[in-house]
Image (cartoon, helix red, strand yellow):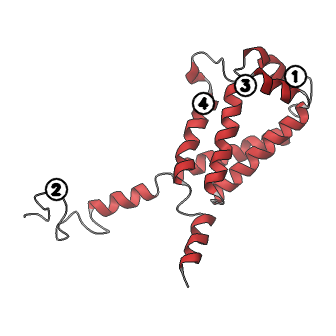
Amino acid sequence: MTHGYRTDGGATGTGRGDGPRGRGGLRATASRYALLPLRIFLGVTFVYAGLDKLTDSRFMSAAGTGSIGDMMRAVRDSSAVPALVDLALKNPEGFGCTIAAGELAVGVATLIGLLARPAALGGALISLSLWLTVSWRTDPYYYGNDLVYLVAWLPLVLGGAAFFSVDAALAARRRTP
């Protein structure tokens, strides 16, 4: 054994790459925080999207330029799930308000890390519903952002918010007697 490595490829504990300051420690620290930029981006984006919709009187209308009603009518025949659009069209203002409130709740919960996995699942479901209705026929598909948001939420569904979060603080509090 030389340079702190065993012949089987593992570290011996005496080499330069070990411990919290060695390369292995830096890699572990970096991977612990890897989801934080994604969490911040998605949280800020969904808070902004929710507030933007809730404060736009044109969007929260059943008809007219820029309204949720007109948008849903425009995508009805090109959506993957027209029945979902028909359901939204029964009460466009209510649907718009529900989407906006959902985006706001998901965004805030994601930013502060409260119920992070359920919040990420909510974000994924909002993105899925928008992809299946509004941006389904975007061609080429990579011009539509709803599919990208759906995929971006999945690491947070799986990983949660392990750092700088209410969830982490509550978990630490439960561990200490």
Q: Nearer the viewer, mark 3 or mark 1?
A: 3
The single residue placed furthest to the front in the displayed view is 83
Residue under pointer 2 = 9
**Rendered residue at 69%/21% (across/down):** 80
First in sequence: mark 4 or mark 3? 3
Disc 2 on helix, strand or loop? loop
Residue under pointer 1 = 65
Q: Are marks 4 and 3 in contact (CB under 8 Å)?
A: no
Disc 1 on helix, strand or loop? loop
**Is residue 15 in view?**
yes
Residue under pointer 4 = 147
First in sequence: mark 2 or mark 4? 2
11 relative to 167 in the view: left or right: left
Residue density around tag 1, few if under 14, some if 14–19, many if 20 or more, within 10 Å: few
Q: Which mark is residue 17?
A: none
Q: CA distance from mark 4 to mark 1?
A: 25 Å
Q: CA distance from mark 4 to mark 3?
A: 11 Å
Q: CA distance from mark 2 to mark 3?
A: 51 Å
Quarter occupied by residue 112: bottom right
Three-letter code, disc 2: Gly
50 relative to 23 in the view: left or right: right
Q: CA distance from mark 3 to mark 1?
A: 19 Å
Disc 3 on helix, strand or loop? helix
Three-letter code, disc 1: Thr
Query: Is 21 drawn above or below residue 135 in the view shown?
Result: below
Query: Is 108 drawn above or below residue 76 in the view shown?
Result: below
Residue under pointer 3 = 133
Q: Quadrant of the N terminus?
A: bottom left
First in sequence: mark 3 or mark 1? 1
Image position, residue 57 (x, y; %): 90, 35
Image position, residue 105 (x, y; %): 75, 51
